[in-house]
Image (cartoon, helix red, strand yellow):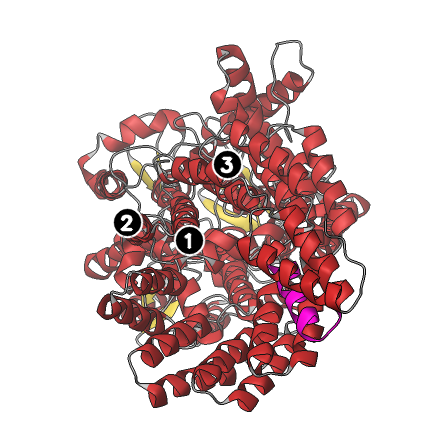
Amino acid sequence: MKKVYLREGNHDIQPRNSICSHGRLVDRRLLLATVQAYIHEEVEDVCFTARYQRLGAVRRRQKAWAQCVSMASRAYPALPPPVPCTTLCFSSDIFRVPKPSLRDRAIKTNQDLLPETPWINIFYDDFWGTLLTHSGSHKSYRPLCTLSFRLNHALGGLDPWGYHLVNVVLHCATTALFSSLSSLLLGSGCWSLLAGLLFAAHPIHTEAVAGIVGRADVGAALFFLLALRCYIRHCSLRTCGAHGRSWTWFLGTLACASCSMLWKEQGVTVLAVAGMYDVFVFHRLKLQQVPMFFQKKKNLHLLLSVFLLGSWGIILLACRLYWMGNKPPNFSNSDNPAADCPCILTRMLTFFFLPAMNVWLLLCPDMLSFDWSMDALPLLRSIADWRNLHTVAFYTSLLALAWFGLCHYPTKSKETNGKAHHVANGKSTNGHSCSSDYEHSTFYSNSVQMNGTNGTAKHYSSSLPTTESLVVFSLGLLAIPFIPATNLFFYVGFVVAERVLYIPSMGFCLLIAVAMRAFYVRLRRKSSRTLVIGCSAALVLLFGIKTVLRNRDWQNEEMLYKSGISVNPAKAWGNLGNVLKNQGKVVEAERAYRNALYYRRNMADMLYNLGLLLQENNRFSEALHYYKLAIGSRPTLASAYLNTGIVLMNQGRLDEAKRTFVTCADIPDENLKDPHAHKSSVTSCLYNLGKLLHEQGHQEEAISVYKEAIQKMPRQFAPQSLYNMMGEAYMRLNKLTEAEHWYKESLRAKPDHIPAHLTYGKLLAMTGQKTEAEKFFLKAIELDPTKGNCYMHYGQFLLEESRLLEAAEMAEKAAQLDSEEFDVVFSAAHMLRQASLNDAAEKYYRQAANLRPNYPAALMNLGAILHLNGKLQEAEANYLRALQLKPDDTITQSNLRKLWNIMEKQGLRTMAP
């Protein structure tokens, strides 16, 4: 499949009545006033000063006007052009083949995606389609992501290409917004380009972009950045005195934060990140200055903004908790083993290690996996575990960076986009410059800083935030969105999940760019600076290569699961077994299942899957063994009960099958991960129990069981077979009105349901509606001309109408099409016999006897047709064989005596006693 390039950039359209200077909306009148003030030398030190202090007044005025006009013609800061293109290059490989990430519960079996399901249900169900208040719900409330899935489903069904296209578009848009944010903080030079490229190329994003369910993280990140951009604009306008427009942007922040949370829960953390930006970046406060700053009345605007951010966060979290029933989700031991560990020390050491592990994945994404559950990450059970050194090193580094950003005061030399600015007498002088920073000059011109002694506000004129401020902001952007996944405040359903790092990786990429810029500024030698640039380029290149290689792992399910064997062998081998089974590689699939069970013997799903594989290959005894093991491992696994009962039915152990079906029907769906699948299995159990009772002649009991099945039937269950069997039970009781009702219900549920056409046709024939009956038989044949059963039923109808030749033709057609189906072949032989076509009847009676050599009725009928055709000795042998299997059969005994009389008259030797 060809690579698809969506677009080359994400340039926002600027309103005509304003201009944008890197995130700050500036009214044209304010700009003109500033320029006029500057020309009349009423404003000093607004960053024009450093560039033009050596120019004459006339030349200074001319350049000021020229650059202001240039500013007025610009919209949002243009992205570094390679970034969105690079994102597409890294992402385009995922279009080549369908991916394995159309998760069954999120996409394939999620009823909320279907057009017949009311769209409002999305706001009451979790991400997987389970009612949010259900005890087994995952509590993942992401309605906007589910709505996007529903739109994909409406446009393209289950074709993976459309789903991946949306993921890539969202990733490109997110990368564009992040690059724009980096330009605000680092300037439009090489360092913002570095941050954008790192984010575009980072391998940790592969799961979020290539995996369909990862869309929740990408969508949340998009609105996360939109909320942050709105708040940055709010801060700028608030300082300028444009309070009306400022609070409009603030409302946009709250709205985007809400949308981010409705894409994924961690999106709500943008409110905390925005507050951190306001305090530590926009106002450039140090930790010890914060209390003093908030005591000043003139700083109430900052206090009000932060207070409203916190209040809105509390409201969103309270609504979220209420909407999910005020109950936390329940997770299994395999999802998060540390959370289920009884040892407090083990839990504490493991949970403190997990953030270090995640940062290591960001720093060195060498070993990635589609799943980190079960034993993929061994628990830290003692202080002697060497991994505790990683924990200590991580938190030491984190605290050192936090101290540098929050408590360390900048020196007189400040970095601005790779250049050293020296401050003297309150004015900045530019040491040297290789690129224009004019575009960023006015963004921070109104920011303030607290005086350390008296708490008064001091206006800054620096064009960009200080390194210390950027370190604090980067750490906040890295750590705060990750807090919900730390297990420190509440347990989550995973140990490590690469897609969860999608938003925190923004802080990581920004921190790397800040560090590289700081090294570049502090190093004086050209060779050293070249080395820094080379290391940055090498890092982007290595990340890009790893992303391309990781994308290849996601090209199909088999490659993905093979890539995870080294990290999570139990889960990877089990999923690989499913893939190999679907490919028809039975031996390899069985080996994969057994490998999975070697690593984890109590996996109920793998035991069940192995049993299912064995059952499909007619190894019923082995299948039954593994089904029982699966039930022992998970007593609520309804599908294992269902298939156990089916195997027992095939083995003739009908009483055991009944007990198994009844046990399954009584299993509640509380605290089950997938209640919809459980209800479907329970309904199927009741269906098979009713069918068993129906075949034994207990029609009233069968109807009672069918009614219970209808009551427990979930929305996604296909009810046509159940309704049809209900009609057959009523027909056996000669309640034709009720039977007709259920046949019609079956056809209403599925208009092309062939069994309902056949049974309803039989009912119409019984009630004398011959013409209508024949139409239903012919319709069944039209729906599937290759199904012999349809011809058989139509042949029986023709036989009852004494249309013998037509009936014989239908019988032979049925037997030819379904030559391996005993019922079809046996019935065809009957019809041919009744049509006096004894030679053809003999052929199919022989075929039926070969299909079931130990079935007395088949042998008896074969003996009878041979008797009629004069093949007396063969007839005798078949009669005797039938009597060995069923000695008390009076018809066979009578036929055998008649045969012996004929043979004696003809002087033939008999086996008579």
Residue 125 sits inside the magenta stretch: no
Q: Mark 3: which amino acid?
A: Leu
State how far apart marks 1 and 2 are (Cα): 11 Å
Left or right placement of residue 53 versus residue 207 in this view: left
Residue 543: where, in percent of width, then height?
71, 50
Left or right placement of residue 649 versus residue 739 in this view: right
Name the residue: 50% across, 51% down.
185
Q: What stretch is highlighted in magenta?
A: 857-871
Figure label count: 3
The tag earlier along the polypeptide, 3 or 2, is 3
Name the residue: 68% across, 69% down.
867
Left or right placement of residue 501 versus residue 267 in this view: right
The tag on residue 691 is 1
The residue at which mark 2 appears reads as 704
Name the residue: 41% across, 30% down.
286
Secondary structure at numbered mark 1: helix
The tag on residue 708 is none
Is residue 853 positioned above or below 16 on the image?
Answer: above
The tag earlier along the polypeptide, 1 or 2, is 1
